[in-house]
């Protein structure tokens, strides 16, 4: 009977192991976001992903590199290109934005593919060009 | 006072559709308008709540439909499709669109889209008090002029402006349509014009839609509308034209047309709000932001959320428990006695009629009523979380963790509630905003080990693993979670693929607001009433059916309602089950019977076993071998246990840690051990563990089935039922075999 504790221990270990695998699995996959020509062009144009926008800074939304069905959700929430957005909170996970007077939570994977322009950077860039 | 003739002679029913953004105070306004005269159901074939109600104004009946909250009419979410279909096909007399005055710009986006439908529209600026507090001044007349639609201000929470809204709606229903047209700029306007002319030339395609709206939507690439147009005569040529114009405009502008059009709308709205909105102070940090700094804090967020969930859990279990007991007491005590006395006065005592009334009807009704306190307390908790705005924060905080298993942050709450009771948990999936997530979560809820299953674990762990009982019980809970994760991942890859690949989280976090007692009261009562209307019948039906099965003799003699268990249809059915359980190590009579009774309610598994074994007599070592000889007696006791099942149904919910423990007599423990040893060929512990796993994973109870059918429809319910049985059998089989292997080695 005592020996039968083993299946239980194995089960629990299996559960924990699988949970661990599941938790570990996703972020690795996320890092394989394709770096295509378009992305390099955007970076070259001085834009940066919203996900890398510093907290509390105003930024101007420039380009949405996201799926069609998501675009519409973003548009109807007021995240149209040219809109000012501010990162209210960025705790590593989903981000909290201020957009047109409302607060919008945005998944990080999405924020990686939304390109913004920081006004200060623009000001620095101008005399150079 | 009102005669039937008068109504038919004067059918002055005005239909109003209430539209608006989520969190714009639409439901509050709906409650203020209709009062208690409302009905909560689901939209046909959808898992979205539909609320309809009515009010009277100047002797006129106004029927109001509360549309699902939507940010636009683009038809990219189920809510938007439901709202749009209603507006397009039911064509209400007036659309009342509720806009949050504190967030004018975003809310006007929907207003502008609604006006394009060219239905009589009234714009309600809600939460004017909060707007005033924030120093926002809105020039209502200028706004009305710019939109070309009447604008009414209101504070729905305090029921201010309700009369004005009703009056404006009545006026708008007869007034000529005057909404201003939004100018999309020359390139798009010429394309709109092109498509519009073509559509106007083909009334069949138009099918009652406003032609300009049709043109706008087709240019925007509305797939839902396009597929509908395609089926109409001449529809394909119109679509081809729209597609051609769309490509041309996209080329000319160098941007996708839908993007440009959304941008044009927002630019137009932005210019408008600049004109009509005056902000005294531009407070950079709102009180809501300040609260959010704590509630969505990177470290504090999840603990705070867990605390909130713990409260919900406690409320649905502890708060309701005394009431459940009370209902149980009334039904099984006085009510049953009165019923029996009444039957006796008719000279029918000790007949099947008495049995039908007490064991069938009263027990069944009790099974339904027992859920009222549970659901009321769940809806109390949900209403507070939703109305205060915290629910969205919880979803935000949990999203990162939950998205790993293909669920949203909002799925966490139903799954958590599932540890208490599966029924309210399935109803709690309503808080999810996407149908796929809702179905997925509801399918996973039953794997969360509910409180009713715990007594079984306690009993069996005490018998078979006395030194490791807490480890075993803990392991079972974890196993449930593990299976849910695996099943969730499997479903996500097969039946319920993510609608938007890598869609990620996009969600508005509404400002925090103090919930109103009135709103919470309405939600509690109306939603509970909807449960009674929809799920009660199935629970009652199942209860009566099983009673009937135990009452019908099958072959070997006996009269209807007076038949030994083994000779009844039910007895036969449960003996058929035994061979199927043999590979799991508990292919015995008693376990089969206990599992069947567990279909009605899990906590009666233990009491059924206690009953069957207790009347088997002094079960010694040869207990199981006397199985065949004492068949009839065991069957009779099983019958009594099943009858008790129905009496116990009202105790369906709530955690009862001691329930199993108290009843565990040494005799029962010995009997179960002996029986399991016999049925498993000496591997009693392995069989016991397999039995626990089976109890964990198979269908929770008929009330859960009723809830699933109510929320998901029959198809998913059958899938869930079948899937759970298969998973339970396979898992129990594996556990037993593994146990035998390890134990034998």
Image: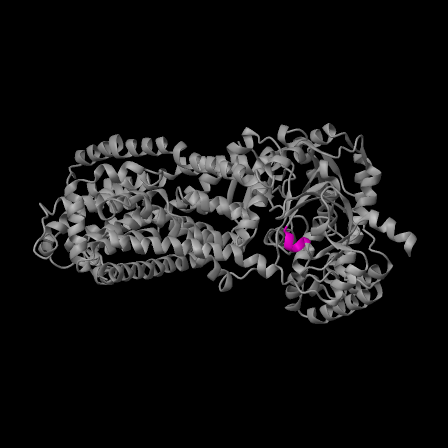
Q: Which residues are magenta?
A: A107-111
B551 lies left or right of B161: left
B497 lies left or right of B743: right
Q: Main secondary structure of the magenta part?
A: helix
Whether residue B275 is visible: yes
Residue A100 sits in which quadrant?
Answer: top right
Q: Which residue corresponds to the image point at 51% horizontal and 54% vertical from the top-left?
A: A23
Nearest the camera: A4 or B447? A4
Nearest the camera: B551 or B256? B256
Q: Which residue corresponds to the image point at 18% horizontal and 49% vertical from the top-left?
A: B672
Q: Which residue corresponds to the image point at 48% horizontal and 59% vertical from the top-left?
A: B489
Q: Position of residue B463 (x, y in %)?
A: 22, 46
Q: Which residue corresponds to the image point at 34% horizontal and 51% vertical from the top-left?
A: B696
Q: Position of residue A103 (x, y in %)?
A: 68, 42
Q: Position of residue B556 (x, y in %)?
A: 11, 58
Q: Position of residue B73 (x, y in %)?
A: 67, 52
Looking at this rendering, what residue extends furthest in the left direction? Answer: B629
The quadrant in which the C terminus of chain B is found is: bottom left
B456 lies left or right of B54: left
Let me know if residue B587 is in the magenta part: no
């Amino acid at each position: 009977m005592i020996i039968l504790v083993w299946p239980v221990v194995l089960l629990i270990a299996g559960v924990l192991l699988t949970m661990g695998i599941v938790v570990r699995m996703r972020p690795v996959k996320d890092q394989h976001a394709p770096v295509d020509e378009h992305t390099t062009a955007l970076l070259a144009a001085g834009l940066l992903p919203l996900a890398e926008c510093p907290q509390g800074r105003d930024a101007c939304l420039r380009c949405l590199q996201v799926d069609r069905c998501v675009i519409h959700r973003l548009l109807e929430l007021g995240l149209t290109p040219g809109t000012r957005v501010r990162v209210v909170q960025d705790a590593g996970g989903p981000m909290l934005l201020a957009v047109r007077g409302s607060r919008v939570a945005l998944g990080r994977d999405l924020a990686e593919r939304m390109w913004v322009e920081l006004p200060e950077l623009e000001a620095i860039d101008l005399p150079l060009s | 006072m009102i005669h039937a003739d008068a109504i038919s002679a004067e059918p002055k029913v005005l239909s109003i559709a209430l539209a608006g953004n989520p969190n714009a105070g639409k439901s509050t306004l709906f409650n203020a308008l209709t009062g208690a005269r409302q009905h909560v159901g689901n939209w046909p074939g959808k898992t979205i709540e539909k609320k309809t109600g009515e009010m009277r104004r100047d002797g006129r009946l106004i029927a109001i439909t509360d549309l699902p909250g939507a940010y636009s009419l683009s038809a990219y979410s189920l809510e938007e499709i439901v709202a749009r279909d209603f507006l397009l096909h039911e064509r209400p007399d007036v659309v009342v669109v509720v806009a949050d005055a504190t967030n004018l710009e975003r809310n006007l986006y929907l207003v502008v889209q609604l006006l394009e439908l060219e239905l009589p529209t009234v714009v309600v600026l809600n939460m004017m008090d909060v707007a005033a507090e924030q120093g926002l001044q809105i020039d209502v007349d200028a706004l009305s002029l710019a939109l070309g639609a009447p604008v009414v201000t209101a504070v729905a929470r305090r029921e201010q402006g309700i009369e004005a809204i009703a009056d404006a709606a009545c006026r708008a229903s007869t007034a000529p349509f005057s909404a201003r047209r939004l100018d999309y700029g020359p390139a798009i306007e010429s394309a709109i014009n092109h498509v519009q002319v073509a559509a106007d030339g083909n009334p069949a395609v138009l099918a009652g839609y406003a032609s300009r709206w049709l043109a706008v939507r087709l240019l925007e690439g509305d797939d839902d509308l396009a597929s509908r147009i395609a089926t109409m005569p001449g529809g394909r040529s119109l679509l081809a034209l729209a597609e051609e114009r769309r490509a041309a405009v996209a080329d000319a502008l160098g941007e996708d047309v839908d993007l440009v059009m959304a941008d044009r709308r927002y630019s137009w709205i932005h210019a408008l709000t600049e004109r009509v909105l005056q902000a005294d102070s531009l407070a950079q940090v709102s009180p809501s932001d300040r609260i959010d700094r704590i509630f969505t804090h990177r470290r504090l967020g999840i603990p705070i959320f867990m605390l909130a969930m713990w409260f919900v859990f406690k409320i649905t279990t502890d708060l309701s428990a005394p009431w459940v007991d009370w209902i149980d007491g009334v039904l099984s005590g006085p009510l049953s006695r009165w019923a029996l006395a009444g039957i006796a006065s008719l000279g029918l005592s000790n007949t099947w009629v008495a049995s039908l009334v007490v064991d069938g009807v009263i027990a069944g009704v009790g099974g339904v009523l027992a859920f009222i306190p549970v659901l009321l307390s769940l809806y109390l908790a949900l209403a507070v979380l939703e109305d205060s705005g915290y629910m969205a924060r919880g979803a935000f905080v949990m999203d990162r963790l939950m998205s790993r298993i293909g669920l949203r942050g909002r799925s966490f709450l139903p799954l958590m509630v599932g540890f208490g009771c599966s029924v309210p948990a399935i109803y709690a999936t309503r808080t999810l905003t996407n149908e796929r997530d809702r179905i997925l979560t509801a399918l996973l809820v039953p794997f969360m080990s509910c409180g009713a299953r715990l007594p079984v674990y306690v009993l069996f762990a005490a018998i078979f693993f006395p030194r490791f009982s807490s480890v075993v019980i803990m392991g079972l809970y974890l196993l449930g979670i593990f299976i849910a994760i695996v099943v969730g991942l499997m479903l996500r890859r097969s039946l319920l693929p993510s609608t938007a690949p890598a869609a990620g989280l996009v969600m508005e976090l509404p400002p925090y607001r103090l919930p109103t007692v009135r709103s919470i009261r309405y939600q509690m009562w109306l939603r509970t009433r909807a449960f009674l209307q929809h799920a009660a019948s199935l629970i009652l039906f199942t209860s009566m059916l099983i009673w009937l099965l135990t009452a019908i003799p099958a072959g070997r003699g006996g009269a209807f309602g007076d038949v030994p268990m083994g000779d009844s249809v039910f007895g036969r059915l449960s003996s058929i089950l035994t061979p199927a359980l043999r590979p799991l190590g508990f292919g015995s009579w008693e376990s089969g019977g206990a599992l069947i009774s567990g279909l009605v309610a899990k906590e009666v598994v233990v009491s059924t076993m206690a009953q069957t074994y207790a009347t088997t007599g002094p079960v010694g070592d040869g207990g199981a071998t006397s199985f065949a000889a004492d068949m009839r007696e065991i069957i009779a006791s099983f019958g009594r246990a099943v009858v008790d099942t129905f009496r116990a149904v009202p105790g369906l919910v709530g955690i009862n840690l001691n329930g199993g423990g108290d009843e565990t007599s040494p005799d029962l423990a010995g009997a179960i051990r002996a029986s399991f040893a016999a049925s498993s060929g000496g591997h009693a512990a392995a069989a016991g563990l397999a039995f626990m796993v089976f109890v964990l994973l198979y269908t929770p109870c008929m009330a859960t089935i009723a809830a699933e059918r109510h929320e998901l429809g029959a198809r998913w319910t059958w899938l869930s039922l079948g899937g759970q049985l298969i998973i339970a059998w396979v898992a129990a089989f594996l556990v037993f075999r593994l146990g035998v292997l390890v134990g034998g080695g």
